[in-house]
Image (cartoon, rainbow, N blue to C red):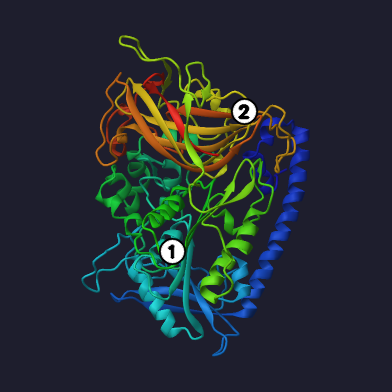
Amino acid sequence: MAQPPFLETFYYTSPVKQHYSSLSLRITLLLAFVLHVGTTVFAQTKTNEDSIYVREHYTKIERMVPVRDGVKLFTSIYIPKDISADKTYPILLNRTPYSVAPYGETLFKNSVGPSPHFARDGYIVVYQDVRGKYMSEGDFEAYRPFIAQKKNKTDVDESSDTYDTIEWLLKNIEGNNGKVGSWGISAPGYYATMTAVDAHPALKVASPQAPVTDWFMGDDRHHNGAFFLMGTFAFLSSYGATRPAPTPKGAPAFSAYGTPDSYEFYKNLGPLKNVNEKIFKNQNRIWNQMMDNETYNDFWKARTPVPHLKNVKPAVMVVGGWFDQEDLYGPLKTYQAIENNKPKSPNLLIMGPWIHGGWSRGTGESLGNIRFGSKTSAFYQKDVELPFFNHYLKETADPALPKAYIFETGSNEWRKYDQWPPKNTVEKKLYFHPDGTLSFSPTMTIMQVGVKPSFDEYTSDPAKPVPYTSEIRILRGSDYMYEDQRFASTRPDVLVYQTEVLQEDVTISGNVFADLFVSTTGTDADFVVKLIDVYPGDAPNNSPINANMKMGGFQLLVRGEVMRAKFRKSFSKPEPMVPGKIENVRFDMQDAAHRFKKGHKIMVQVQSSWFPLVDRNPQKFVNIYKASEADFQAAKHRIFNSGNASSYVGVRVLE
């Protein structure tokens, strides 16, 4: 008998598959199904209530808004029905490449605004298809370069399109109070960032949330120059497809995988060039842009807003999630770029225990097997986001939010700081030792003339890459961000270093970075470093998704990052590795706020593949986007751990 779709999904994506006999599995699935039905009914009831409220209290109109070069942008506008000369409302603007659907003035979104609280509080909520997407005119450009000195009406960018849209709304939508706020998550988060660049005077607040900020350095498509294959292929198969004319329908994503196993699919697909040869046929423009720009050149540099975040006048609240599988880089770098330019208006950073956009949906009480002890998303929506917007757009009381409102995982506490990273932190180094231990003290061995430094060695074979997850899945998902790492720690091509049992808590807050001394028998390599919290053997089995999940010894991924070694000196001018030569490979692992509790251990894993999350490195100095199967070779990598060649992971420890 066929199982309900939920049971099938639950079975193939949860730990119960690994731990139960057929009978106990069926019982567990039945209980899970009952819980799922209850949760679904509750969520559906809430969604229905929100939908009914929007229909009863809002009028929807659709307009083609003209911008300075004559292009018209499709704009969906939700206006409170009780608007009048005596009762006005601020405007909330969301610009998106993902469609303002549903289309038609009689068809309504289930909820409008960043959360349902905004509809009930009263806002004019505006959604706009960006230039070249869905029903808007013009040509689409993924992260269109900003033009600082505009010389004529044809010099347009996302900042100018926003400025012109706000100007039109103020003049044509009656009942607005003259104040505008913007928000967006992911790509719409990027567009929210751009609203603050050369901002319209009426824009009083902007909230870039998980904003795409740099597709080469750390968001979505690449990390430190390494290509994120799995997510990019699936996403761009639709996002990068051509759109001959405005349409309310998006292009379908690729679905002919022929297997539920991404590891199998991408291995069989072969080198990156096969994607075009076998699937896209050179018809996917954005994919082609990826393949034509292997280094951090002018193409990529022109597409990041970071250099333009100067003289930002609106108040800004940047939001991100510590478990964001797509854009953890964006919020951290956007906040820091604004902060570095000493803005006169408030610039806040909110970081919670969320996956991509998790703060806007659900309760935020847990992820996978990890509990956070409170309804973090609900708290953010009600006590942080709404009061912030209301203060600047409705002149309500100042909510007195801290400069940095940071959820500290491990301790499950919200922390308030007057800067990020906090002032009371010191940089410490977690050194790798020859015996596989990890500590804040360097190896005592001193390099002497003629004495070779110690090292650990492993063979990395592109034909047998280290998987990024233990699950069998075809789409990337987010589970790998908080998944038990024991599946990788036993592989011979993964090095493991761990501390003794901690005698006191160790709390990190701020940047994490890897500083490796390596050598290879090849001329290129990837290095993946994972910082992990190892639970004690007697940790309680308190998983929210499976009460029988064995949490003793659980290896929680706190931060993981990859570096393509040929970019070790410059992301713009790659250099080959010299076989056998010890070289320094140092890279940003992004920020973290985590407490390693007394009784736990700190672990670091080092490997050279993370497949198919990241494409395979041939371990030969070539343009990987043009490489052939013959270019791929096994190589031996050494990680050095003594004297002047002592590898470590750097963290900022809270004192």
Examine the rendered structure and indicate whether residue 178 appears above or below residue 112: below
**Left or right, 494 with reference to 470:** left
Q: In terms of image quadrants, where is residue 575?
A: top left
Q: Which residue is mark 1?
A: 192
Residue 535 or residue 46, whichever sits in front: 535
Which residue is at the far left? 151
- The percent coordinates of residue 507 (x first, y second) are 57, 38
Examine the rendered structure and indicate whether residue 581 appears above or below residue 625: above
Examine the rendered structure and indicate whether residue 81 appears above or below residue 541: below
Residue 501 or residue 295, whichever sits in front: 501
Q: Residues within 10 Å of mark 2 (few under 14, many from 20)?
A: some
Residue 284 or residue 523, whichever sits in front: 523
Residue 521 or residue 270, whichever sits in front: 521
Say the numbered circle drawn on residue 264: none
Q: Which residue is mark 2?
A: 502
**Left or right, 154 with reference to 588:** left
Q: Give the mark, 2 or 1, whose residue is nearer the N terminus.
A: 1
Quadrant location of the N terminus?
top right
Q: Amino acid at mark 1?
A: Ala
Q: Residue at x 27, y 32 (%)?
A: 622
Which type of secondary structure does the marked residue at label 2 adopt?
loop
Query: Are discs 2 and 1 less than 8 Å apart at CB?
Result: no
Quadrant location of the C terminus?
top right
**Left or right, 251 with reference to 411:** left
Q: Residue at x 58, y 56 (%)?
A: 359
Which type of secondary structure does the marked residue at label 1 adopt?
helix
- The percent coordinates of residue 618 (x first, y second) are 34, 29
Q: Tell me the distance, in whole angstroms, between the alpha carbons under discs 2 and 1.
A: 43 Å
